[in-house]
Amino acid sequence: MTRPIPGLHHVTAISGPPQANVDFYTGTLRQRLVKKTVNFDDPGTYHLYYGDAAGSPGTILTFFPFADAGPGRAGPGMARAYAYAVPKGGFDGWMERLAEQAIDFDGPEERFGQRVITLRDPDGAPVELIETDRDSAEALDGFHSVTLWERDIAPTARLLTEVFGYSETGHETAGGVERLRLQAPGEARGAVIDLMRSDAPSIGRQGAGTIHHVAFRAETDEVQRDWQERLAVAGHPTTPVIDRQYFNAIYFREPGGVLFEIATDPPGFAVDEDAAHLGEALKLPAQYEPHRARIEQVLPPLKVPA
Ligand code: ZN
């Protein structure tokens, strides 16, 4: 079993009140809300999933919106930013559209020869848009990459190259910030991981506007079981397989401290509602269905822009 990881499955972050989050990701960033469910560990809180029209792996950004979440900030040992891939020819259009809507962004700057702009979501999370030459019918072609902030880049780079099958494809240092680019083989969305290290001292704090974990793809349950074994052998024991309704998940902490997950492609988001109506109704896992009335009472109402 030497199959490499193809790329990201999803990224999960923490936000403040959900309505502003829905407005930003579906409105400004033109993502589809592909699932409206609850936090399986805390069913009084939503778990919102955004993605492309089909809810494909490599496009999925999920949020736990806590109404009273204090602001967080990224630091070493945390994922710092997620980046969407702007399809070929679309980058200038994005900048014009954001400017027309008076939405602030930083940049464009160059990173490994590609233009990057950085927006802030309603909780201050940095959202990067990176110019690519990918052809896509979508406004954004899923993830380009995530950036992991590390105290020491080397141990995480070793995990990604020696175990996951990534290759180093770039190394830049500018303004006291070192960035190492690693790439999975193949053309999957979200195939890039950037590891960054900063000379400036900083301490992160989990809270609104920060990333909770980064999930990589396993194409099948069998592949996931192989990863469980390989990671244990490599000194990174994982949790048991956890049923997340739309995928199965295993978790472990990478050497720098970021929570990694490996999530299966199946069954996907159409497992409990019609693919044409993803995200429209509140979906609950079987154990919470008997408590639906009470859960719906506690959750704030959400309006998804048409
Ligand atoms: Zn996850």
Image: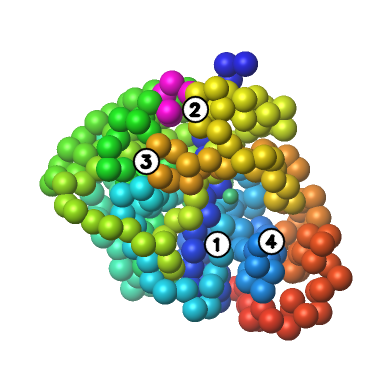
Q: Which residue type does callout 3 highlight?
A: Gly
Q: Position of residue 226 (x, y in %)?
A: 65, 24
Q: Give whichever of discs 2 and 4 has the lower sequence position.
A: 4
Where disc 1 sits, the SS reads strand
Classify mark 4: residues with Cα within 10 Å, few (<14), some (14-19) or many (20+).
Answer: some
Give amino acid for label 2.
Answer: Gly
> In the image, is residue 222 above or below residue 174?
above
Q: Earlier in the sequence, mark 3 or mark 1?
A: 1
Residue drawn at x 54%, y 69% is 65
Q: Is residue 162 magenta?
A: yes
Whether pointer 4 and pointer 1 mark residues with C-beta atoms closer than 8 Å, the reply is no
Query: Circle 2 is placed at which residue position?
Result: 235
Label 1: which residue?
63
Asked if the stretch drawn in magenta spans residue 99, the answer is: no
Amino acid type of the residue tagged 1 in the rendering: Phe
- In the rendered image, the residue lying farthest to the bottom is 297
Q: How far apart in space, not on screen, are marks 2 and 4 (Cα)? A: 29 Å
Q: Which mark is residue 40?
A: 4
| Amino acid type, label 4 | Phe
Highlighted range, magenta: 159-163
